[in-house]
Image (tube, rainbow, N blue to C red):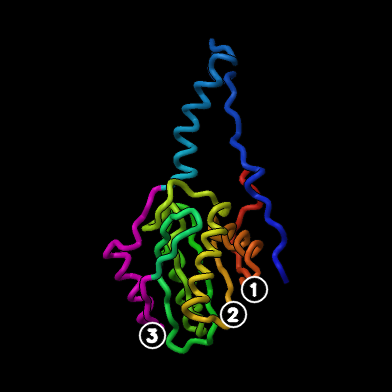
Amino acid sequence: MRPGRVNIWPHFSFVPIYAAILPGHSHSAALPAIARRSWRVVGRTFFSPPHTQATLPQLIREADASFSVTGSRREDFSVRGPDGVLLHGWKVRAANPNGSWILAFHGVADNRIGVIMQAEFLLRAGYNIVMMDARAHGESEGPMATYGWLERNDTRATVDALIATEHPLHIFALGESMGAGIALQSAEVDLRIEAVVAEASFASLR
């Protein structure tokens, strides 16, 4: 079954902050200043979440310990998005691969390590995993996160690179939170993704 259309970006809006909360200020004078201050705080956090580098030694040790349990092995995997942004991640090969690959998408302000538990479960079942840092996250480049709008094109580039090197039998996607939204939007525009597991996605950004 193909996922339904996920129409997210056109619904984006911030909740207005009313000047009535500032006694003694007129609406026309207060609103622009409040909006600017709100954008500096909310907008930066929303579109430019803090980076947690996946290459920090402690995180690498945790990932390798997880992979060793399943007999899996990882290798660096870098892909350049359509707009030139360089994305970094791993390809992780199952000990007894079944020929299928799963794209695992992490949540906001996280990195590829955020889906390590799901990866361990799937690696045991023979699925190979692609674990990428989303744009503006982890080691990946990009000025801001767009919650699927640009990331879906990044996914298409990732699938292109995966097919060119691995010739997967099937390609699936799994994501949580922001990653679930990216997985759904990616499957909408790339029919090579055959199925999606989406955990705690969003219907819109309102």
Residue at the (40%, 57%) spot, across then down: 140
Query: What residue is disc 2 on?
Result: 170
Point out residue 174 in the picture as x, y percentages from the top left corner. Answer: 56, 68
* Callout 1 crowding tier (Cα within 10 Å): few <14, some 14–19, many ≥20: some
Q: CA distance from mark 2 to mark 3?
A: 22 Å
| Label disc, if present, on residue 194 of the rendered structure | 1
Under mark 2, the amino acid is His
* Callout 3 crowding tier (Cα within 10 Å): few <14, some 14–19, many ≥20: some
* Callout 2 crowding tier (Cα within 10 Å): few <14, some 14–19, many ≥20: some
Asked if the residues shown at circle 2 and circle 1 are in contact, with their CB atoms under 8 angstroms apart, the answer is yes
Q: CA distance from mark 2 to mark 1?
A: 7 Å
Task: Say which of marks 2 and 3 sits in front.
Answer: 2
Q: Is 9 on the left or on the right of 78, as rendered?
A: right
Under mark 3, the amino acid is Gly
Give the residues in magenta. Answer: 50-76
Position of 36 relative to 79 (above/below): above
Residue at the (54%, 12%) spot, across then down: 25
Position of 19 relative to 206 (above/below): above
Point out residue 36 in the picture as x, y percentages from the top left corner. Answer: 49, 27
Q: Quadrant of the C terminus?
A: top right
Q: Is 41 on the left or on the right of 27, as rendered?
A: left
Q: Nearer the viewer, residue 193 or 29?
A: 193
| Label disc, if present, on residue 150 of the rendered structure | none
Point out residue 193 in the picture as x, y percentages from the top left corner. Answer: 61, 71
Residue at the (48%, 59%) spot, across then down: 81
Find out whether residue 67 is within the magenta segment.
yes
SS state under label 2:
strand
Point out residue 202 in the picture as x, y percentages from the top left corner. Answer: 62, 53
Query: What residue is disc 3 on?
Result: 71
Q: Nearer the viewer, residue 166 or 73?
A: 166
